[in-house]
Image (tube, helix red, strand yellow):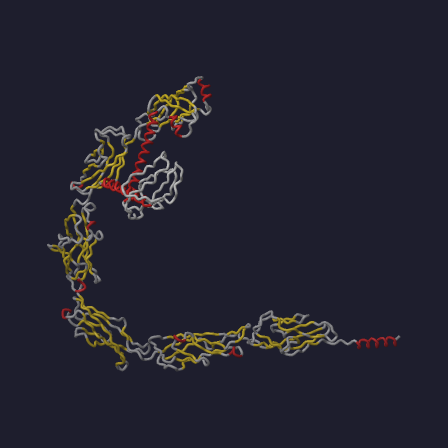
Amino acid sequence: MRKERILLSLVSLFISMGKSDFAPYFYDNGANSFSGNMASFTVAEDTSVGTYLYTLNGSDPEGEPVTYGITLDKGYKEYFSVEPKSGHVTLVESLDREVQDEIVIFVSVTDGRNKVVERVSVFVTDANDEKPEFFNLPFIVDVSEDTEAGRSIYRVQAVDRDLGSGGSVTYYLQSALNTKFTIDAHSGVLRIKAGESLDYELSRTHFVTVVAKDGGGKYLGKYHVMTSSAIITINVLDTQDSPPVFVGTPYFGFVYEVSVPGSELFTVFAKDGDQNNINTIQYTILNGDDRLFSINSTSGCISLTSEPGQLRNELYELKVKASEVDLDNQLLDYTVTTVTIRVMDLNNHPPTFYGESGPQSTFDLTMYEHPPEGEILRGLKITVNDSDQGANARFRLLLVGPARVFRVVPQTVLNEAQVTIIVEKSTAIDYEKYHLLTFKLLAVEIDTPERFSATADIVINLLDTNDNIPKFSSEFYIARIPENSHGGSIVVAVTATDPDSGLWGEVKYSIYGSGADLFLIHHTSGVIYTQPWASLDAEVKSKYNFYVKAEDIEGKYSLAEVFVTVLDLNDHPPEFNDNFLEKTMIIGAPVKIEAIDEDAEEPNNLIEYSIMKGDPDNIFDINTSTGEIKLKPFIKSMEIVQNITKQKDCRWSVVVQARDQGSPSFSTTAVVKIDITESNGLNGPVAAFLMQSRDNPMKVVGVAAAAISVMVLVTIIISTVMYLRNTKSNRITPAHRIIRRRAREHRQWTFRPPLGLTDSKGNNNLPRPKPPTPRAPVLPPPPSNPSERQWAVPTVSGVVSFRKSSRSCRQSTDKLTDVVTEDVSSSLVSELKKKIEQKIIEANQSYYC
């Protein structure tokens, strides 16, 4: 048994030794590969988080699946993560080469039983992500103002932590053209620009902006240049190089008439132009004082050394010198200024107005209204005076009151002037608006601090003139009066006013015009009446118009038009021509009756017709507006009429009333006898007219006479027009034509004297050819049959020669050949035309005479 157990153990050991387990391993594909164990792998510092970077790649000798992992030493930031199965490595933290340019990681691969770990380094490459950084900020430089151009005054330095071109730095100044400085692009040395200098007195501090720029490089896939800027403060230090400066120039001093010797007139002040090492200032007067003024050498106070009466000039200009004095009382730089001393009169007299008897504050004047423009108010004697001298005696004159009515002359006065007031706007000086005009005359000093002034009242009493015409309250008046008004009735009252005073304002009225015969007007009140004998009738005349005149005492007047309407009253009843009327009515056609109302206006003359009674009753209808009477619609034939009357004589009567529409209303009646008949077969309006008018034959006669008169008048007009036309046409020598006729059988030889010869188109203005010499006509041969009728030949004067016809004569006894030659026709026509022209000439002579 023991041997068997030992044998089994040996067999198991042998089997296990035949199945050995080997560890997995990484592939090493080199530094430039993106697959393997990441040894010497490089990644740019601007790579975005989440970017896929690398694939860990390994294998197991037994072919078992493997997984991957990445770990770092404790305390280090984890920049990468790996997907265990695929080995994909992803960036999970931002990189910064300037902080850490090498990252040590531990990569592992395992088959589940065996794990292999390798230590590898990942290198971070540079990107241009850093700006240049200045050292020793802030930059403050102190420079003496006498530093010469081109000298170095400061050096700036900046560092860029990027590598390569991104780490190189160059310098330049912003707004380089507007500054006094320049900088070296590579060294950063700041210098004063050539041709420039510093001046403490002009500018004590300069601010310069310097920019540091790197050489550029890629960042996030794009070429990028980074810059930084800093301000350099340059303080200019003062040196002893400026003369004294007077403060508060220009200088003016004044001497008044009350000044006494020793009076202080003005104090000048100067200071050292340099700010450091300030020296004492000493004052002196170089010239211009004429020993009349003196100056304190320490304080600069200028004083008067003589009486004001000794000053002969109004203006003095003193040259004052300010000199710097050092500790050893040595005079250094100096400057000179001008001090103007003006001799002033003391302004102690205001302007004053004077009249003829002395100072005066009120001036009165009486004048007529509307004086001519430009006229001087000569009744005012005004003088104005200011006793001061020079500018103190200059003042302005103003006239305060209604604008642009008067103006004052002169407007500016020196010492004294005569005041003149001139009319500027005549229309504003109106007695009807103002009986009294009041103005203020004002004198005000111009250039003095006190601005003394004086006033005077100008009171103008206006006198009236007759400068207005009477004016009606309206340009026209409209009046209405009933036609039954008795004589002397009031029609309308007109009103006119004249704003003038006294007798000039009294108005007298009168009336005239073609329509004024029936009216009269009260000459003072303007009330218009009808004449005592006047009787107004709207039916005779309903409209009147005339003019009224308003006139003042001097004959100035105005006109207005009056329109009078006579109101119609219903004072006429309607009237028929006769109280008994006879009419003939054709069945189906109306008959018309008419009443006339002589009232002038509607509704007084509007008539309404009605049937009061009929015999027989209820047979007729009447149009209430036109008065047309017609049978009831059911009466259409004489048989129906005869059935109603039972008589052959169809003569009915009806009582018609005509009533007007006035108030009160009037009416009248008439009996109308109507003979009923049927149509007789005559059609048309003429037949209807004759039938309706058979009871009134005079109406037919009148219509016929009117028609005949119209026809006669038309005939006369046509004849006159034709006569004048022919007279005008025959004043021009007309042309004639010869008509050649062919011989015809059984035709009498006739000649018709033409009234006018025309061409083929009917024109009668052809030139007349010279007629041939007339010749006696030759008689035709006698007929063969003695019993045949002889043709009569017209007897005319002239010589006609016989010419045998070219055609042979027929043997028929009932026909005669009409043989006329051309010469015969021409002669006859010429002879007849001469006679006709002679008659036309005689007619024209009698017409114009």
Q: Quadrant of the N terminus?
A: bottom right
Q: Is residue 452 visible?
A: no
Residue extending farthest top? 646
Residue extending farthest right? 1
The one of 671 and 305 positioned closer to us in this rendering: 671
Residue extending farthest left? 357
Q: Quadrant of residue 480?
A: top left
Task: Give the side of residue 337 with respect to residue 672, left or right.
Answer: left
Image location (x, y in percent) of residue 524: 19, 36
Image location (x, y in percent) of residue 820: 34, 43
Task: Give the side of residue 818 with respect to residue 127, left or right.
Answer: left
Q: How many marks?
A: 0
Query: Can you say whether 14 is above or below 351 in the image?
Result: below
Q: Quadrant of residue 116?
A: bottom right
Residue plotted at (13% across, 52% down): 379
Task: Give the side of residue 178 with respect to residue 111, left or right.
Answer: left
Query: Can you say whether 634 is above or below 797 in the image?
Result: above
Task: Give the side of residue 779 with respect to residue 86, left or right.
Answer: left
